[in-house]
Amino acid sequence: MLSAKTGRVMNKRRAAIVGFCIVCWGALIGRLFYLQVLSYDTYRAAVADNIERQTTISATRGTIYDRNMVQLAYNMTTYRVFIDPSRIENQEEAQFIARFLSDTLQVDYDTVYERTQRSNRADETIKKNVDPDTADLVRRFIAENDLAHKIYLEASSKRYYPYGSLASSVIGLSGTDAGLAGIELSYNEALTGTDGRYITAKNGNGGALPFKYDTYVDAINGYNVVSTLDTAIQAALEQQLEAAYNNALPTNRIAGVVMNPNNGEIYAMATYPTFDLNDPYTLDYDSQVSLDALNLDPQSEEYAQKRTDLVYEMWKNKAITDLYEPGSTFKVVTTSMALEENVVDFDTEFTCTGSYRVEGWNKPINCHKHVGHGTHPFWYMLQQSCNPTLMQVGERIGLDRFYSYFEAFGYTSITGIDLPGEAHGIYSSFSAFNNVNLAVYSFGQTFSTTTLQQITAISAVANGGYLVRPHVVSRLVDDDGNVVADFGDSVKYQVVSGEVCEKISEVLEDGVAHDGGAKNARVNGYKIAAKTGTSEKRNKIDPEGNTQYLVCSTVAYAPSDDPQVAVIIIVDEPRGENLYGSYIAAPFVSNLLEEILPYLGIERSIVDQQVTVPTYVGKSLAVAETEIEQLGLHTEVVGEGAQVLAQVPAAGSRMEPDGRVVLYTGAEAPEDTVVVPDLYTLRAANAKRELYELGLNISFSGLDERAAFVYTQDIAPETMVPRGTVVKVKMVTGGITDG
Amino acid sequence: MARSVKDKRASRDLPASADVVRVRAGVDRPMLLIIIILLCFGSVMVFSASYAYAYFKFDDSYYYIRKQIGFLVLGSAAMVAVMNLPVDLIRRLTVPFYLVSAGLLAIVPAVGLAEGEAVRWINVGPITIQPSELMKPALVMILALYIQNHQEQITDYRHFWNSSKYGLVYPSFFILLVCVLMILENHFSGTIIMFAIGMVVIFAGGARVFWFGAAGAVFSVVVFALIMFTNYARERIDIWLHPENYDALDETWQTTQGLYAIGSGGWLGVGLGNSRQKHMFVSQPQNDFIFSILCEELGFVGALSVIGLFLCFILRGVHIARRAPDTYSSLVVIGLVGHVALQALLNIAVVTNSIPNTGISLPFFSYGGSSLVVLMAEMGILLAVSRYSYQQK
């Protein structure tokens, strides 16, 4: 029974117990509040980390197209084939696998076999970058022989450049996930896109969860870049750069740009020697030679460093990263200033005595023609590229005006091309600009600019005075073809008037067509405006310390009365004799224009004596023979039939009117039976005779004067060709000096 | 207060026959309701927490809930049966019940020795009996009986030694016997619970507060010394405070994953049935760590409601104890409520990593066959006493 005292005590004790409980539970509530409310984010993340398995869905890098939507760079799926040696059961199986993989993947059998023996490993790579077709063979082999956990394929994406070295320095190259140079770098953000992810949930044992947890975030593919490049023009440019390179063997590469002078679209831009985008770390021949010449231990750090430097040098887009003194090609710019300011006109007479004295300089400044040009109108002096004349013109323009035009033509800034690494020219500040600067600037010396800057300035003269922003990308499009960004409009402002430009174009064209210093740039049938230039590299002297290195260049645009294309080629540090832009660069500009003007659909405006061979195939022999005779050509028939089955030269070929057409009427087909001779330096008549004796045809291009000689031929000596084939030769003259 | 003292006095003065009248009165409705809510809530949570594990383990999501419902039916029968027993009968069965429980508890280590490993169960035909579960009410009851019989001496605080002897030393023998048997079973957490329940009853029975203070002081000194001077204790403390650094250990893995579950619940939880952590992260989520899944699914609000239910249970239990007809029934109720409260408190403290991990289940919530039946039988005793709690008019 309950006593009163016990009752009182027990009441107190119960109250104490209840109190204790409340305190404890209160503490737990606090603890739960801390865990669930205050630390929610931490634990939520921890659980997500626990259960989520995230897979990245790579966004596909955009494709780079040329202007005609030809793919220049795209992604290709490649596979890594690897084996799990720890799962290979016995020697028989190891040999079986090794035999198959070595045969299929073209890997040395012993190497593969050795890998199969590394039984403590779970991932031994056999080959990377395996193409999808080969990967399919491996996949089938795995399925047929039940080797699922022994051989694996791992897909990945690889950037592929179908044209290899074509436009390599413009396209640039891409590492695994980011561009390293060129368009790949400057448009990296647009090309990259956004990776997506696939999030799924797994239970503590890695098994699937019964509820729906999957989250799928689509990858947003990179935009496709449509460049202004034209694969055909690019190829033509690179072909001429290579020819110019082989001709002059320059020690500091060749750069060339072909652009639309009216809107700044770059049709082609190249550096030679260059590199293969699919094999970007292999040095070009010259670089390798210069590296080997250092006699370094290939294992040494110094060698590796030097090699890396050379690789980066090779990747450079010379036309925008390297500076040079433009030399005489700049005279076009000076002339435009003078005409615009009305300080001279083309009929103004100037006298050249072979040198000119400028106040502030203790020596007379020489003309490239040391005996002097005599007294002639300005137009003639410009065609002859007379330095004293331009110095006098510069004087008339004056310091202020000259410098403001110099700025307006863009020489004190960068062109703003959409490529990385554009170099900033080196020039005098206005405050330091004096008479002596003015004199030498007038003919393009002592300041430096980039190849691209120079052709941009020349383009302004070509297009009627407008400075444009050169660019290599015209628009961005998404995978559905929608235009995301358009970079069409690129005219910045007008520098000089259209009339001035027209006059200059006429004078330049006249010089090319007749006896100007740039006549080696002539292209039969087209009005070409061109100016050559040769400048000294005053900061670089050869090991003997006597000869200065030169830069020989030529700028041109055509047709001169309605320019559609502007071209520049600069040959940096050429070797040999006759080192003038007119000889080292101009003929290649001519060859290039000869190829790309018809390609751009520009008709020949000047009729010449060459004939274009029509189609005879399919016609009766008699009709063909009559037609050929009417053209003044000769006929050679092979076979006994009455129908023409084949013809050499092909329809559309241009050739001299006294050549021959070989018609095939029987079972015989054209065969490569004639060896093309080396025509270099031959006069026109000799070259023609030599080819005709071999049964070949000739097509002259360039100069038709007596002194002209064969400089280049489109089919290399020693090549075997069918009878009747046309060999196109470029006729030039040497000995034209320029400044 | 005055009135309640008067009540007690009144009930003490009532003749035995008056008890019989009140036996016919109904059980305490609020308590019954709280118990039913706890049981339902618990069963829902057992199902929710167990189905992923059951599916994984037995390919049958309903494996545990089916068994749980079976035990619930069995437990309900036990509860109804017991709550209709007269308290007098219960009191008379106290000593035999204690002896049988102690006997069974003693058999377990022997069985364990025979089988070569420590066990906590004995199989009687198809039924698995966990004697330690039986021992909890048995200990409460025997202590209550002892205290009722010696209440005068215990509360006679003028005689320090005498009151200490009757209030603490003698009843401690009942507890010590049980604790020794539990330790033989290698059942550490059970030992603690048993000891704590015993202490609650002794405390409620009026033993000198001095001894509890002294025990607390000694305990603190010993723990402090252990932490200061032994690496083992320090390491245990470090594991407790930084379980995430000891992932390799099963129990810390469990603790960490439990914390993830609790913490990721937020205010309102991820929704009933939507726990992510029960999918093989918290292992055997239907057992000791069920509260973590509850927290994850129902959030802080859900956890509070569970705590609220337990607090209601405690308060109502104490209310019943206060109105109990005699010292024995009052202490039995206090002991049983204390058992549930302590276990819930310790379980949630463990799950929230507020104290080091020991294997203590959450009453009404954790899956556990025979212990549920025993728990419900205990609730039967509690409700049986509540019949007497109604104030006679």
Image: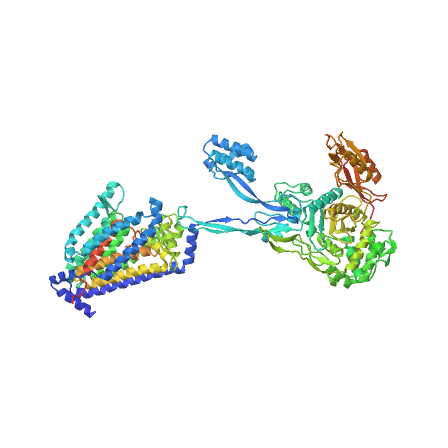
The way the protein has been coloured in the rendering is rainbow
Residue at 86% x, 43% y: name it.
A706
Q: Quadrant of the N terminus of chain A?
A: bottom left
Q: In the image, residue A437 lies at what x, y percent?
A: 78, 59
Residues B98 and A202: in front is: A202
Q: In the image, residue B119 lies at what x, y percent?
A: 26, 45
Residues A673 and B380: in front is: A673
Q: Is residue B204 visible?
A: yes
Given the current orientation, which residue lies at the most extreme right position? A375
Q: In the image, residue B121 lies at what x, y percent?
A: 25, 46
Decide if residue A561 is on the left or right side of residue A167.
right
Decide if residue A24 is on the left or right side of residue A381.
left
Residues A2 and A289: in front is: A2
Q: Quadrant of residue B8?
A: bottom left
Residue at 51% x, 48% y: name it.
A57
Query: Quick check: A718 above or below B1?
Result: above
Decide if residue A25 is on the left or right side of residue A260.
left
Q: In the image, residue A60 lies at what x, y percent?
A: 56, 48
